[in-house]
Amino acid sequence: MKEAFIIDLQGKYIEPTLVMDSVAGVFDIVETVSTDTDTNKGQAQQLKSNQPNTKVRGYTVAISMPEGLYEPQFDVAGYRDAIKLDPTTNGSTFWKNGLTQAEIEALKPQPQPNPVETLGQQLVARELEVMELKNQNATQGTALVAMELRLLKLEGMGTNV
């Protein structure tokens, strides 16, 4: 037994299923349709054809699906056209992402910053602030000393008169 896939009429993946190892390709999933309008006419047609009225409701795809697809879809019509031209066609190439690249990127988790790196950056920022404040204090201290000296000089001049 091997894995196959049930898809809907638009080619969207629905669920996995199992098939015999020898099975390969795409197969219709059909259901019998009963006609409610003119039952006698429907029975007469059924007797003529010996075939019940059926409707395709999906497909079984016995072709491997590549890994890493988001909401996978299978191109049934494209596969069937290609297989008519070349029976050795690689069916896996007819699987594709059902989401756009932008939708896929939105699903991926955003990288979280490393807490050690974040703390290290914060520490460096604080150390730079401390150095800047020390520099400002030294500048203001020098300015204050200069002003006090000037004041003392002015006071000293006032007593000499």
Image: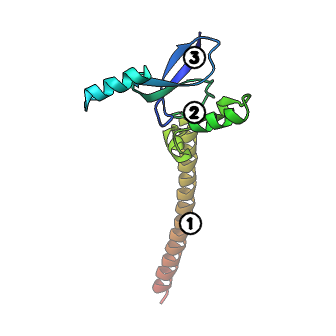
Query: Which residue occupies the foreground of this view, 31 or 75?
Result: 31
Give residue 71's position: percent from left, percent from top: 50, 34
Disc number at residue 3? 3
**Please, what is the three-letter code of the amino acid marked with disc 1?**
Thr
Query: Which residue occupies the foreground of this view, 73 or 59?
Result: 59
Q: Secondary structure at mark 3?
A: strand
Q: Secondary structure at mark 2?
A: loop
Q: Label 2, on which residue?
A: 69
Which numbered mark, 2 or 1, is in the foreground of this view? Answer: 2
Whichever of callouts 3 and 1 sits on the residue coming sooner in the sequence is 3
Which numbered mark, 3 or 1, is in the foreground of this view? Answer: 3
Vertical comparison of 110 with 159: above or below: above
The quadrant in which residue 111 appears is top right
Q: Label 1, on which residue?
A: 139
Vertical comparison of 161 with 8: above or below: below
The quadrant in which residue 3 appears is top right
Whichever of callouts 3 and 2 sits on the residue coming sooner in the sequence is 3
Q: Secondary structure at mark 1?
A: helix
Vertical comparison of 64 with 153: above or below: above
